[in-house]
Image (cartoon, helix red, strand yellow):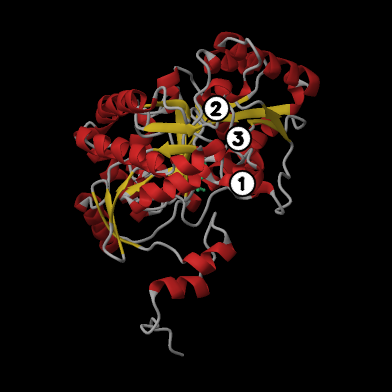
Amino acid sequence: MDISPAHNQSLEDLARENVLHPFTSPKGLLETGPTVMLEGKGARLTDAKGKVYLDGLAGLWCVNAGYGRIEIAEAIFEQAKKLPYYHQFSAMGTEPGIYTADKVKRLAPGRMARVLFGCSGSDANDTQVKIAWYYNNLKGRPQKKKILARNRAYHGVTVAAGSLTGLAYVHDAFDLPVLPVIRLTCPHYYHEQQPGESEDAFCDRLVEELKTTIEREGAETIAAFIAEPVMGAGGVVFPPKGYFEKVSKVLKDNDILFIADEVICGFGRLGTPFGADYFGFEPDMISVAKGITSGYQPLSAVLVGEEVWETIRDASAHLGVFGHGYTYTAHPIACAAANANLDIMEREKLFDNAAETGAYLQEKLRQRFAGDPHVGEIRGAGMIAAVELSADPATRKTFDPSKGVGKAVAAEAMSRGLIVRPMMNDALAMSPPLIITRADVDEMVDNLAASIDAKRDMIA
Ligand code: PLP
């Protein structure tokens, strides 16, 4: 058997013939092939053809500490040499897994009690559903099963997490959702407001919707509510002011767990350690991934608060083991990467840079695009933002999706050396590494402006 690389074929051809790419048109890829990235340093990537890009999306919203961090690479190498693998089943453990749990818990908002590691944001949210069910079963409330989730939410793609996700392209032809998920309105004032409705009134309407949904379904049938503090893949959506505070109260009054999906917001994206810190709420459970290792290794975690932990602990008297976890739970190499990454974040005060340089990014975007005849909304805080294109900003009219305006602008930006992500309603998302400088911000904004200008003919 010979499995050495076929050097007579280009990387693009090998990918065309062998790889099923996530969130890519399988047929389209046969024509275009992939863009193959070879190297990264700081906020910049170099592709296989030598072209350099400013990575305005930090990979997939995750390379918070930037590329080329030797310290993380060395931590991975040292751990691989010392002990590449051991598990946490049956009361076993490794140093990195224990240290990472301690660090993450100390950074986390609310009163988090225990940390359970996984490998992806999706598996973290699957675990959340199981723990919400487990907790309620243990409390003698087996009928508390439904999960409240918002339209346009992105919680992952596995069977449970994909069911929580509120985007059609994750469900279509996959027979999802399969969970008892109750959908709530996406908290996007710009698109969801009714004529003459203020932002405050919009917020109150969403809270009223939550209350009436709970009344209709019965609080005794609802286990949890899950929300990203800022929706990422659904279009960088910030809720109206006061939303989480009011939602938290309704959930508490009805004994419904609040699961914060901090997979994007966690570890500094908004200039605060977590999204819950930015909005000032206290979740019962938290999912993290992405920024925990800055993407250098796959790692996620579920954090459970005191109340849930105590119930789980006390149940072991009759259940014995807690029957959940993965072969790779607290993988020592992934946790070694997390520890090195979190040390960098602390030493270099990356959350502060996300707040300060992030404020500059937000200001520059508003200066440059406010009043643009083809820009509807500029939204963001810290190191996450979106510029939404519009066919008519005065009426918030979106373009016909078949025109692919956002995709065309993102492709233009890429040809000019900037990666931004086209989202629904032709919003262009940015979520750069937290290390970026003001000069990088200027470059991003200039490039995006030039890319929009280059596509005015198509837009108009
Ligand atoms: N939750 C949120 C908020 C995300 O943004 C993502 C991925 O983008 C996920 C969950 C799923 O994470 P993963 O792709 O690691 O499964």
Q: Is residue 263 visible?
A: no
| SS type, badge 1 | helix
Q: Which label belongs to residue 12? A: none
| SS type, badge 3 | loop
Q: Is residue 209 above or below residue 318?
A: above
Residue furthest bottom as drawn: 1
Kind of residue sitting beneath label 3? Arg
Residue bearing the label numbered 3: 152
x, y percent for residue 140: 73, 28
Q: Is residue 125 above or below residue 270?
A: below
Q: Is residue 119 visible?
A: yes
Q: Residue at x 27, y 35 (%)?
A: 441
User: Quick one: 375 or 156, which is closer to the camera?
Assistant: 375
Separation (CA) of disc 1 from disc 3: 19 Å
Kind of residue sitting beneath label 1? Ser
Residue bearing the label numbered 2: 392
Q: Which label belongs to residue 402? A: 1
Q: Is residue 21 left or right of residue 369?
A: right
Mark 3 and mark 2 lie on one chain; the one further toward the N terminus is 3
User: Quick one: 417 or 42, which is closer to the camera?
Assistant: 417
Res. 84 image quadrant: bottom left
x, y percent for residue 402: 61, 46
x, y percent for residue 435: 25, 38
